[in-house]
Image (cartoon, rainbow, N blue to C red):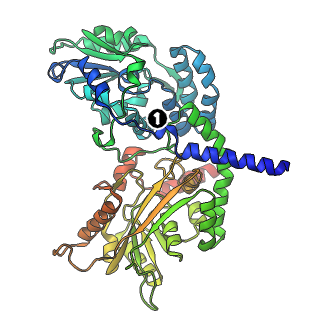
């Protein structure tokens, strides 16, 4: 009886965590209501008055809906430092609530940045902008884009917000404290306020031809900052007023959010972070279990067991889909958009038969654990074409012509090589949904990608097979090249998913997120491995 009661309690706790993490409160968005927006606008200068003036904004107090900086520091701790550093910050949260704002800020900076290499500071450009955009207030953004010149002040280290403010909001000047470094590592200390005051004097020492600057800040802290003492007029936003603000709709983003990195898929408030750490003791063995059933059991058994463990999938196939291969005939070529490393595995499970996947780069660990055959490409067009043609003669083949994964509702440019291999291709549209961890990374360990995806309480995969596309006949009455066929397949998948097609490439993604072109120098890697052995 005792063991049965314990099992029932454990099952109830698992169901609670799954519901809470799959549909968390932080995903809820309020519907904008015009009355609060109009009230905020009436208290500020109109567009004509702001066109010739400098607008000074407090990021935390006058631009973001939430004044709490804890989630952003938690992101830095988790993404740049790891789970242990994030757990330490979470344990210190009750103490942070008892400290003053300034002392608490210094503690969070020390915990998050002490010992972090300078390369780890790319979190401010690759990870944080997504969460800043989600927390950006529609009311504050409407005012910000009116001004001729925009100056933003932040209490966070400047490296955390500068990339977001300049790249996405077009802010000309960011006033904030720098992190101190020693030997390429952060010391966890920031420069003093006095050094920032000198920067402020230089900024406002220039001739102001616009009739004075206008400031928007917070009632709790902005009025005491030297930057706002130079403003002719200051509007202070109260916490009650900010609670009526609304999230900036995605279609109004000043710059499309196509790429972002990091493992955390939710806003790590203290409660959400606590739930994540409570889930990990259950999530790790569940991930091992989910991986094992797909490695060891046939699809007809592993798919129902996976669904029982919380994995969700949806399959849509047209009646004209030909999945039977005739004897001595070439295999089918499946062309899909790229969401995670599990794309070919899900396609194989949907077809209930083995397929071969080609990839440009894959971890040896992922290759060894893959339940389907994987073949590496060389990025040499002629050699890759010969390899793929040989694989097609042996059986069905899956190719992801984007060359890299994309999390957001966008499709990267399709490489046209697949259109030169066979007369007919089968486009496959894929969608993934996660609530806790992203199953992709640009700067982390790629062999962990599938495990992070399976560690979600309820990971979802939608697989939709679209109608066959001929690569030899004309499209819309016009003959087209392999590039035209690739663009046509891209548009067909984009229309099925409601995604926007772009001309961005793998190189664009890695230059933005990791500061490289996403190509590993094998010779250099071998030398570094030998040095480690020595």
Q: Residues within 10 Å of mark 1 (few under 14, many from 20)?
A: some
Q: Position of residue 208 (x, y in %)?
A: 18, 13
- Which residue occupies 63% across, 25% down? 92
- Which residue occupies 58% across, 19% down? 97
Relative vertical location of residue 313 with respect to residue 7 in this rendering, above or below: below
- Give the image quarter of residue 204: top left
- Which residue occupies 45% across, 80% down? 323
Regarding residue 398, the answer to whether it shows in the image is yes
Q: Is residue 108 left or right of residue 60?
A: right
- Give the image quarter of residue 326: bottom left
Q: Position of residue 441 (x, y in %)?
A: 48, 50
Q: Is residue 249 left or right of residue 474?
A: right
Regarding residue 184, the answer to whether it shows in the image is no
| Label tally | 1
The residue furthest bottom is 327
Q: On the image, numbered disc 1 is attached to which residue?
A: 121
Q: Position of residue 415 (x, y in %)?
A: 32, 65
Q: Position of residue 359 (x, y in %)?
A: 45, 66
Q: Secondary structure at mark 1?
A: helix
- Give the image quarter of residue 336: bottom left
Q: Nearer the viewer, residue 391 or 345?
A: 345
Relative vertical location of residue 422 with respect to residue 63 in this rendering, above or below: below
């Amino acid at each position: 009886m005792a063991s049965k009661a314990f099992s029932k309690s454990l099952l109830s706790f698992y169901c609670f965590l799954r519901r809470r993490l799959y549909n968390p409160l932080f995903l809820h968005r309020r519907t904008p209501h015009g009355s609060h927006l109009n009230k905020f606008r009436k208290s500020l200068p109109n567009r004509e008055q702001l066109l010739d003036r400098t607008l000074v904004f407090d990021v935390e107090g006058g631009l973001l809906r939430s004044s709490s900086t804890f989630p952003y520091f938690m992101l830095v701790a988790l993404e740049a430092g790891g789970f242990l550093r994030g757990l330490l910050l979470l344990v210190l949260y009750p103490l942070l609530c008892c400290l003053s704002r300034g002392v608490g800020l210094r503690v969070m900076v020390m915990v998050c940045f002490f010992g972090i290499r300078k390369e780890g500071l790319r979190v401010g450009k690759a990870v944080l902008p997504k969460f800043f955009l989600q927390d950006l207030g529609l009311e504050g953004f409407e005012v910000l884009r009116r001004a001729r010149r925009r100056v933003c002040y932040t209490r966070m280290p400047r490296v955390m917000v500068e990339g977001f403010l300049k790249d996405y909001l077009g802010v000309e000047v960011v006033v904030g404290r720098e992190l101190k470094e020693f030997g390429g590592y952060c010391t966890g200390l920031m420069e003093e306020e006095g050094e920032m005051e000198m920067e402020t004097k230089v900024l406002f020492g220039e001739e102001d031809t616009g009739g004075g600057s206008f400031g928007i800040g917070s009632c709790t802290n902005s009025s005491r900052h030297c930057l706002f003492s130079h403003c002719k007029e200051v509007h202070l936003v109260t916490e009650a007023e900010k609670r009526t603000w609304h999230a900036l709709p995605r279609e109004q983003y000043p710059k499309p959010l196509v790429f972002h990195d990091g493992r955390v898929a939710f806003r790590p408030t203290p409660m959400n972070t606590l739930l994540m750490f409570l889930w990990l003791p259950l999530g790790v063995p569940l991930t091992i279990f989910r991986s094992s059933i797909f490695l060891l059991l046939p699809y007809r058994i592993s798919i129902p067991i996976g669904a029982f463990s919380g994995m969700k999938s949806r399959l849509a196939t047209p009646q004209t889909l030909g999945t039977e291969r005739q004897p001595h005939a070439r295999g089918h070529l499946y062309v899909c958009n790229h969401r995670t490393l599990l794309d070919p595995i899900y396609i194989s499970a949907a077809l209930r038969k083995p397929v071969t996947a080609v990839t440009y780069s894959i971890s040896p660990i992922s290759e060894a654990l893959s339940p389907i055959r994987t073949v590496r490409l060389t990025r040499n067009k002629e050699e890759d074409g010969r390899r793929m043609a040989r694989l097609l003669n042996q059986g069905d083949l899956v190719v992801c012509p984007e060359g890299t994964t994309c999390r957001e509702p966008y499709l990267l440019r399709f490489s046209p090589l697949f259109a030169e291999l066979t007369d007919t291709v089968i486009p496959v549209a894929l969608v993934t949904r996660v609530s806790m961890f992203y199953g992709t990374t640009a700067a982390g360990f790629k062999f962990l990608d599938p495990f992070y995806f399976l560690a979600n309480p309820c990971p979802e995969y939608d697989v939709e097979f679209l109608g066959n596309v001929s690569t030899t006949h004309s499209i819309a009455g016009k003959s087209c090249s392999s590039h035209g066929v690739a663009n046509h397949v891209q548009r067909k998948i984009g229309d099925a998913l409601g995604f926007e097609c772009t001309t961005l490439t793998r190189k664009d993604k890695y230059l933005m997120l990791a500061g490289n072109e996403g190509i590993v120098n094998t010779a250099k890697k071998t030398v570094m491995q030998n040095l480690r052995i020595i």
